[in-house]
Image (cartoon, rainbow, N blue to C red):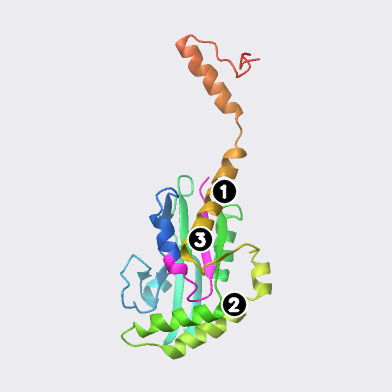
């Protein structure tokens, strides 16, 4: 059974970096779900990598076609920006695990759409002072720094990620990102642990029957570790 692992966290907590690093880990076999946004592309971003950059007109068309799984908006000083997940050919939970970045609101909506057992949160946490420092350094690199918007997002995070909201979303585990390498290891262990849990709860009887069938084909009698027949 495939799952959608949803990375959530306050702004400048390192979500984008963790997202990219996890996708690059060959042992996790995670697929991407590229979300859509109407906000302008930032310096260093590429279409189809961080997001699909689209227009409000196209978003409205997808809504009319009932192809939007979840949508959220941000009232910024530049106008309203929309972020959304669309029903497209990216997702096949019968075969793959996926990784996305979202908000608490988008996580709960995606979980409601696919099912609680198929969507799991990865909450990235970081000291507020360190977050503010990282946000300032990132904004300095933009061709037109948006310091006012940076401060607005920073203050909004305190409300959006309050203890009550985290509890309502069912998020109890946190991954501290003060040390990136340690955080990545812990998140990877979390993902692998859920896969191992799936294997441990899988019914083993079909495997025994398959051993018997294959042994019959070779004219052999399948036996267990104690020497007894697996058919007994």
Residue 89 visible, this angle: no
Quadrant assignment, res 199:
top right
Q: Nearer the viewer, residue 76 or 21?
A: 21
What residue is at 42 percent from the left and 49 percent from the top? 29
Where disc 1 sits, the SS reads: helix
Q: Earlier in the sequence, mark 2 or mark 3?
A: 2
Residue 182, numbered label: 3
Question: Left or right: 36 with respect to 169?
Answer: left
Q: Earlier in the sequence, mark 2 or mark 1?
A: 2
> Crowding near pointer 3: few (<14 within 10 Å), some, many (20+)?
few
User: Camera-side residue: 59 or 3?
Assistant: 3
- Mark 2 is surrounded, within 10 Å at the Cα level, by few (under 14), some (14 to 19) or many (20 or more) other residues, namely some
The label nearer to you, 2 versus 1, is: 1
Measuring from the top left, give residue 225's x and y in whole percent: 60, 19
Query: CA–CA distance between discs 1 and 3?
Result: 16 Å
Magenta span of residues: 1-17
38 lies left or right of 165: left
Q: Nearer the viewer, mark 1 or mark 3?
A: 3
Tell me which residue sits at (62%, 62%) in the image.
173
């Amino acid at each position: 059974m495939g799952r959608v692992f949803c990375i959530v966290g306050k702004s400048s907590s390192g979500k984008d970096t963790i997202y990219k690093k996890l996708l690059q880990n060959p042992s996790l076999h995670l697929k991407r779900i590229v979300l859509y946004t109407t906000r302008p592309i930032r310096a260093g971003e590429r279409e189809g990598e961080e997001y699909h950059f689209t227009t409000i007109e196209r978003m409205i068309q997808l809504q009319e076609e009932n192809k939007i799984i979840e949508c959220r908006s941000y009232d910024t000083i530049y106008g309203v920006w929309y972020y959304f997940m669309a029903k497209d050919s990216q997702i096949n939970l019968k075969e793959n695990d996926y990784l996305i970045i979202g908000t608490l609101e988008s996580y709960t909506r995606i979980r409601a759409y696919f099912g609680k057992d198929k969507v799991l949160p990865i909450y990235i946490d970081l000291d507020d002072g360190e977050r503010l420092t990282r946000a300032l350094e990132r904004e300095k690199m933009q061709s037109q720094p948006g310091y006012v918007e940076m401060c607005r997002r920073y203050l909004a995070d305190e409300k959006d990620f309050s203890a009550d909201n985290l509890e309502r979303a069912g998020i109890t585990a946190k991954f501290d990102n003060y040390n990136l390498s340690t955080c990545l290891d812990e998140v990877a262990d979390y993902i692998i642990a859920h896969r191992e849990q799936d294997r441990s709860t899988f019914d083993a009887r079909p495997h025994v029957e398959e051993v018997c069938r294959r042994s019959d084909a070779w004219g052999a009698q399948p036996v267990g570790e104690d020497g007894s027949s697996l058919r007994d």
